[in-house]
Amino acid sequence: MGASVPAAGILNIDKPAGWTSADVVAFIRRGTKIKRVGHAGTLDPAATGVLPILLGQATRLAEYLVDATKTYLATVQLGLETDTYDLDGEVVLRVDPSAVTLAAIEAVVPAFQGEFEQTPPAFSAIKRNGVPLYKLARAGEKVTLQPRRVKVERLDITSYEPPFLKLEIDCAKGFYVRSLAHDIGAVLGVGGTLAGLVRSRVGAFRVEDALNIETLRNEIASGAWRERLYAPDEVLLGWQAAVLAEPNCSRLVHGRTVLFETTNATDQRCRAYSADGDFLAVLRRESSAAWRPEKVLASS
């Protein structure tokens, strides 16, 4: 008999250029024969890099991974502007950017750090009445978006060889690197578009450790891919952990509030384990010593 299919886990995939995030999900679903497969954070087809794929019960933890800090390596082409804010779009502006100096770029970059308002691209996966905006934009419909509050924890210039500006960005969810490229170009007065993008990190998952599609294809054929799975709680390793005694375990699997004191009174969520080390649930604080099950992965 063949090896049993794991109930849950996470694959750290290095998404290739030309694949959508949905393409990767469909490929893994077909290859592994696991029905519940999802991803944590869409990457544009032209982008490469970390795409965490969640299988089985791990899909229930996707929201926590989507919330994790992400790191991007971006190449911005100055002097060029397109309607999609990347090289796949129609050119709407082309000028000579050679007069733009590194000092000028360094002067505008601080405006794109911390929390600020950003308008997403019209060609985006944001939905209106259930329809992705990029489909409406491609159909010629006028798409108007309101600015949204975004957060950039770090924005470093790694090199500038005109017309190409390279940046490294740590940001929270909802941030569009394409909009950053467009907006920097607009402030500099020469236009800008995203010419290349690599997502190098999503939470604890790094591109250096990611599995490329061809290796995955071979390992699916041999069955070795199972050894690549991270445990579901890898998503939560930065959180406080609670080891529950049997009475609390019994309450937990029946969806009831569990009671215990913690050393850190500020944490609003924690991960819960049995005395045997089994990952049981995500808990949310109700009061100083009361925790409500938010996601229960343990069975009765």
Image (cartoon, helix red, strand yellow):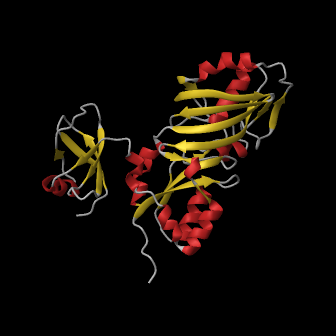
Q: Quadrant of residue 275?
A: bottom left
The foreground one among 144 and 89 is 89
Q: Which quarter of the image is occupied by the N terminus?
A: bottom left
The foreground one among 85 and 134 is 85
Residue occupying the point 71% across, 20% down: 105
- Compared to residue 229, the image places residue 61 above or below, namely above
Measured as percent of width and height from the top left, residue 154 is found at 55, 28
Question: Can the viewer see residue 149?
Answer: no
Residue 30 relative to residue 251: left or right? right
How many numbered dots are placed on residues in this image? 0
Measured as percent of width and height from the top left, residue 96 is found at 86, 25
Q: Which quarter of the image is occupied by the C terminus?
A: bottom left
Residue occupying the point 43% across, 71% down: 5
Residue 193 relative to residue 43: left or right? right
Measured as percent of width and height from the top left, residue 272 is found at 27, 49
Question: Can the viewer see residue 272?
Answer: yes
**Residue at the extreme bottom of the image, as rendered:** 1
Residue occupying the point 69% across, 25% down: 184
